Amino acid sequence: MKVKSMPTTSASEEVYRFLQERFKGDLLRPQSAGYEQARVIWNGMFDRKPGLIARCTDVTDVQNAVRAAAKVGILTAIRCGGHSLAGFSTCDGGMVIDLSRMRQVEVDPGARRARFAGGCLLGSVDGATQNAGLVFPSGVVSHTGAGGLILGGGTGWLTRRFGLSCDNVEGFTLVTADSSVVRCNSTENQDLFWALRGGGGNFGVVTEFQVRLHPLTTVVLSEGLTPEAGIRPLLEFWREFMADAPIDLKWNIDLRLAPQTDKVPVQLRGRPVAGSSVIWTGDPEAGRAYLDRALSQSHPDSVRTRILPFLTLQTMADSDFPHGRRYYTKSGYFTALKDSTIDLLVEAVATIPSPDTQIEFAYLGGAAGQVGADETAFGDRSAPFIMNLLANWQGPSADAGNIGWVRGLFNKLRPAMKPGVYINFMSGDEQDRVPEAYHQRWDRMVTVKSHYDPKNLFRLNQNVVPRDFHHQTRTSISSP
Ligand SMILES: Cc1cc2nc3c(=O)[nH]c(=O)nc-3n(C[C@H](O)[C@H](O)[C@H](O)COP(=O)(O)OP(=O)(O)OC[C@H]3O[C@@H](n4cnc5c(N)ncnc54)[C@H](O)[C@@H]3O)c2cc1C
């Protein structure tokens, strides 16, 4: 990487001076009150110190921040919910364009549509849409940013019923690298509309999402734990069951050590288990037989079925993934879950290095699987099994054990995977896998990137490098 001689602080000072006269939001420098709190992101692995945090209030603020960034050539991060597993929403010495003051949501109940600002959390969107008895399909933890989640694709409880989050976007408004405000949808700037549905933060700062909503206020949730000896038969059963499951049913499986809590049967606590979480979005009576069959492999004392308000479903995992812990992930797809893959998973769950580390499995298909591979930039939809190895631990002394466990298991499983990866489940050390994420769509991604961001101003992401681009920046990215 070429680095110009100007010190990083001078670049951020230059941007600060430019913005000082015209910026309506907050400009936080290391000496400012509130800076220490504002610089922290969700993944405690990234303790970075930006030279400037520009917390925007509206589109004009975003335009000014982008204009200054492009003029000075400062390393620039975009932050919505700050949940980037890879730590892309911060940097050392550069500027963070922070959208956390842009969280307005407007719902049109009659049209079943909403528009919301680029800094919204999932919880902001869910709260407003549920007031009208409607849902936008998104992720499973309400403190995640809608910005990063939707732009990468967005999977969650409703993916099989209503599609990925990005499949439900009808239009975007964004500020591109030349600081213009650009709109895109199915008739306007179609290439950009295509690329933003799965292409991450590569193309500009999205200031507004225009989305489709669906009626839903409650779901049935069944949960259960399968003891270690039952994990293999459970996975065998699951792979067959899901192939014909109705789209109203979503069944996620987590392989992990059972929590040491009263809710878990005594003999399972701290032991390797498979946790099943199954939801049914249709008529509860019609779902009963499916849920009973799905939970038939769980320990009877661990099974719990209830009808839940949608907002409860959306917040029930919030405390499992607290801010500030250390996280590392690797992810991939399987077209089929072979016996040999199940063997490796069963072996691995017995060696999990931390009580909160887990192997997450979901089965896509349903509405998400019906969208053609080339209709959006999002990765492969034909391989229904999506796996995320998510290590989650407390202090730096356990870094090597947890990261090493994820990498080692990933390398063993990799030969059975279908090439491809969901960009939102990637770590920061996987830039070499970005072309793999887009497969046959890569050339088109590069063309759109080269048009809208030829100098790669927006590079702190799963980066699509523009054609003929030679890296030149005043600041450098430091590793965690
Ligand atoms: C606890 C937790 C739960 C999760 N659950 C799910 C889940 O259920 N389903 C799922 O699909 N994913 C899930 N993820 C992954 C999640 O989708 C990504 O981490 C995503 O990047 C988070 O978005 P954010 O806005 O919070 O992140 P940030 O760190 O704020 O942003 C990440 C990147 O997204 C881009 N970006 C964000 N907002 C904008 C914008 N307005 N304009 C342009 N670029 C933008 C930027 O490149 C930025 O670097 C989860 C992550 C966590 C940490």
Image (cartoon, rainbow, N blue to C red):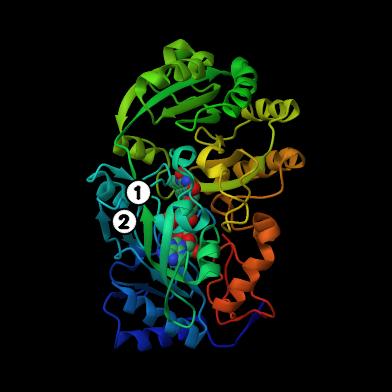
Q: Earlier in the sequence, mark 1 or mark 2?
A: 2
Q: Which mark is residue 213?
A: 1
Asked whether disc 1 touches disc 2, contact meaning CB atoms under 8 Å apart, the reply is: yes
Disc 2 C-beta below 8 A from ligand 1: no
Closer-to-camera residue (115/226): 115
Q: Position of residue 135 (x, y in %)?
A: 33, 44
Q: Could you tell me the amino acid type at mark 2?
A: Ala
At x 42%, y 19%, the residue is: 264
* Outermost left residue: 131
Q: Where is residue 389, by image quadrant?
A: top right
Q: Position of residue 404 (x, y in %)?
A: 66, 44
Q: Compared to 60, does 202 lie above or below?
A: above
* Outermost top residue: 300
Q: Is residue 83 visible?
A: no
Secondary structure state at the residue bearing disc 1: loop
> Crowding near pointer 2: few (<14 within 10 Å), some, many (20+)?
many
* Residue highlighted by disc 2: 114
Q: Position of residue 163 (x, y in %)?
A: 48, 45
At x 44%, y 38%, the residue is: 157
Q: Where is residue 26, by image quadrant?
A: bottom left
Q: Compared to 251, does 152 lie above or below?
A: below
Q: Position of residue 410 (x, y in %)?
A: 69, 42
At x 43%, y 42%, the residue is: 321
Q: Is residue 278 visible?
A: yes
Secondary structure state at the residue bearing disc 2: strand
